[in-house]
Image (cartoon, grey):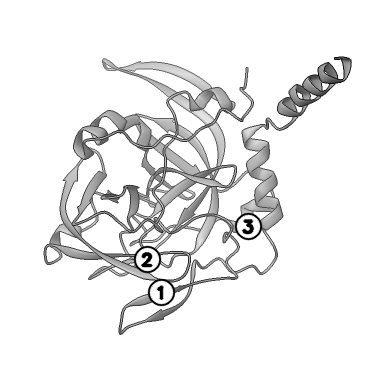
Amino acid sequence: MNYLILILMGLIFLGQKVRTNWIAGIKSSLLKIMQPGADRRLFSGFTQSPIGWVRNAASWVRSFNWTGTAAGIMGLGGVGGGTLITSRHVLFANHVPYRTLPQPFDIFFVNADSRTFTYKVTSIQQVGTTDIAIGTLDRAVDSSINIYSVLPYNWTDYVKVKKEAYNTMGVKGVKLTLSLPVLYGNQTKMIATGDVVEIDFGKAIVRSPEFEPARAWASQLAVGDSGNPIFVMVGDELVLLGAWHTGSNGMDVGTFPWLIDYRPEIEAIIGMKLRVADLSGLDRIA
C-alpha cells in the first residue's frame, strides 16, 4: 500500500513538472531551432506544369505543420496569402485584391509529402468593417492538410499582460501590453520571428523580438505580404493569431486584426465554431 501511495505521489509530481511557462517554452523551442545560416523557406522547389511546390526539408521551422497555409493563389502568387480555419474556410486580408481576380479563383495547398491540392474560392465575405475576410472553398480540403486553431478567450491567464482600461470620446476598451513571441510568413513563404507587444481596438502590433538571437530572425514587411499568417506556438502546434494588414506607417514590423476579438462574427459567417487551442498544460500567470 505504501508503495502505491509513493507511486501516486510520484505521478502527481511528474504531472506538475510537465507543466510549463508558455513564454519560456516558446523561447526555448526557438533557441533550439535557430541555427546560423538555417534556411527560412517553406518550399525548395516549384513546377509550372503541373503547378506544384516542393516542401523544404531544410526549413528551420520544419518541425511545425505549415500545410494549412496557402502556397499560392492563381493570379496573385504569394501575394495575399490564405490560411485554413475550417476545412472549407480560409482567412484572408480584406484589402488584398482577391475580388479583382476572375471568379472563382484557384488557391493551392501543399501537404507534408509535397503533394499540391487545388481548390476554388467561390466567395469572400468581409468580417464587419475589419480587414478580416473569410473565403469559402468549393469543397473540403484533403485530410492531409492542416486546419488551425485559435486561442481561447482566457489566453491572457497564461502570459504576463498589462491591462489598461480607457474611455476615449465615449469609446470604451482595454489596451493590452505584453510580449508574446510569434512566427510569421510573407509573400516569399519565408518564416520570421516577432513579438506581439500591444493589442488595442482589436488591432495587434508586432515588433522585432526582445530576446536574442531571435531579433536577428525578424523581417521587415513589404507590399504584398498582407494576408499572410501570424502564429503563436503552443508546444509543437501553430495557433493562428491573424493575417497581416500592414507593415507601413513607421511600424517596426507591422499590424494585424486580432483574430479572436472577432470570433463571434467569424463563426456566424462560417456557421460553426472555430477550433480552439488547449492551453491547459501551461502554467497560469498570477
Task: Specify the farthest residue to the left.
Answer: 103
Among the two numbered marks 1 and 3 on one chain, the one whose residue lies closer to the N terminus: 1
Camera-side mark, 2 or 3: 2
Which residue is identified by label 3?
Answer: 216
The residue closer to the viewer here, 97 or 110, is 110
Q: Are marks 1 and 2 in contact (CB under 8 Å)?
A: yes
Expressed as whole percent of the image width and height from the top left, the position of residue 232 reads 51, 43
Q: Residue furthest bottom?
A: 49
At x 57%, y 70%, the residue is: 57
Q: Which mark is residue 201?
A: none
Q: Which residue is mark 2?
A: 71
Q: Specify the quadrant of the image occupied by residue 283.
A: top right
- Tell me which amino acid carries mark 1: Trp
Q: Which residue is mark 1?
A: 53
Q: Tell me if residue 163 comes above or below residue 69 in the rendering.
A: above
Tell me the amino acid under the disc marked 2.
Ala
- The location of residue 110, given as percent across then percent down, is 39, 66
Res. 245 in view = no
Badge 2 marks a residue whose secondary structure is loop
Q: Secondary structure at mark 1?
A: strand
In 3D space, how far apart are the residues under numbered discs 1 and 2 (Cα atoms)?
7 Å
At 47% from the left edge and 26% from the top edge, which residue is drawn?
176
Which residue is situated farthest in the right direction here? 2
Q: Give the mark nearer the N terminus: 2 vs 3.
A: 2
The crowd level at tag 1 (other Cα within 10 Å; few <14, some 14-19, many 20+) is many
